[in-house]
Image: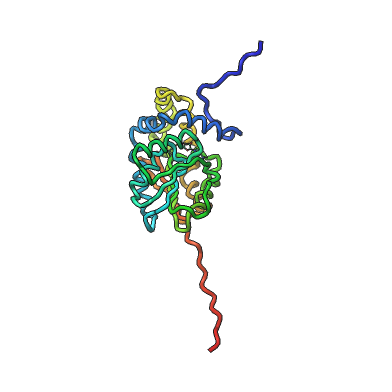
Amino acid sequence: MPSSPRIDPDPQPAFGSSTFGKDLQRMFGAMSPRYSMFDHVSTFGGDFIWRPRALWHADRLLEHPPSRILDVGCGPGDLTLLLPQHYPTAYVVGLDFTREMVERAAGNAAARREGRATFVRGDALRLPFPDGSFDLVTSAFLLRNLPDLAHGFREMARVLRPGGVLLALDVTEPGPGAFGRFFHAYFDTVVPAIGNAFGFGGASRYLSKSIRQVPPRPQVVTLLSATGFSPALAETQWMGIVTGYFGRRPLAQVSPPVVSPGKA
Ligand SMILES: C[S@@+](CC[C@H](N)C(=O)[O-])C[C@H]1O[C@@H](n2cnc3c(N)ncnc32)[C@H](O)[C@@H]1O
């Protein structure tokens, strides 16, 4: 008798597989009701501090308060909904490719009566906006899910206006030494145990593995420069376990007017 196909109740997306994007959407869709709580518990509340601090750092690169902001990989809107508070005259768009996350973010915005944030479904690698649409593009904890980081940065640069600023925040490896070993032990054992308690052990093992996907900080900064940002820089928080990457899309080169000698 043919055996029935085994259904993995808790799949982990595999980097490089042809179904990676779909698997990621399925995983984040299943996590969406408890994602924010898992984030707060597994980081000991650190995520409440990391996002606002990254915004203060971004302010140093911004020449004017931004009016149009895009938050890529918005999830349930934990960063997106901070943005209208931090920039009281801005309109914010949150984008995510997981339908359940977009719905949850919209629900969270409605619950807070936040009328200056809207949410759309879309792919970070094919942003559905014309060139130069935004003054500020943000992302939090998205980079390590992107199969092509350079392409992701190019898309973010494309939708920024000249002079616009990028902020991309993510968990990063603090480096070698005792603290680095503690960091990996924590993410490889404690975070999956917390994930099990939330009912998504496989997903939390994926999240732990994904941290190793992002190249070391200096390489990410080089990639930012190579994909059109100047300056490009990294600011660490909490001994390097979180890094904010920042870049500005340079102002368009303006050539001097051509003046032809007129007749006297
Ligand atoms: C770890 S969550 C971060 C959520 C939120 N930014 C935060 O501050 O907690 C990553 C989010 O990125 C989304 N995501 C991953 N890859 C994406 C892609 N290629 N395009 C759009 N969204 C993506 C996932 O659906 C998920 O909601």
Residue 110 point in image, percent of width and height: 37, 38
Against 18, residue 256 (above or below) is: below
> Could you say which quadrant of the image residue 148 lies in?
top right
> Could you say which quadrant of the image residue 39 lies in?
top left
Camera-side residue: 22 or 210? 22
> Could you say which quadrant of the image residue 80 lies in?
top left
Task: Spot the residue most to the right.
Answer: 1
Against 108, residue 203 (above or below) is: above
**Quarter of the image with the N terminus in it:** top right
Residue at the image point whose x is 55% and y is 45% from the top: 126
Camera-side residue: 27 or 244? 27
Residue 261 point in image, percent of width and height: 55, 83
Is residue 165 toward the left or the right of residue 223 in the image? left
* Residue 233 showing in the rendered view: no
Camera-side residue: 35 or 205? 35
Residue 263 point in image, percent of width and height: 55, 87
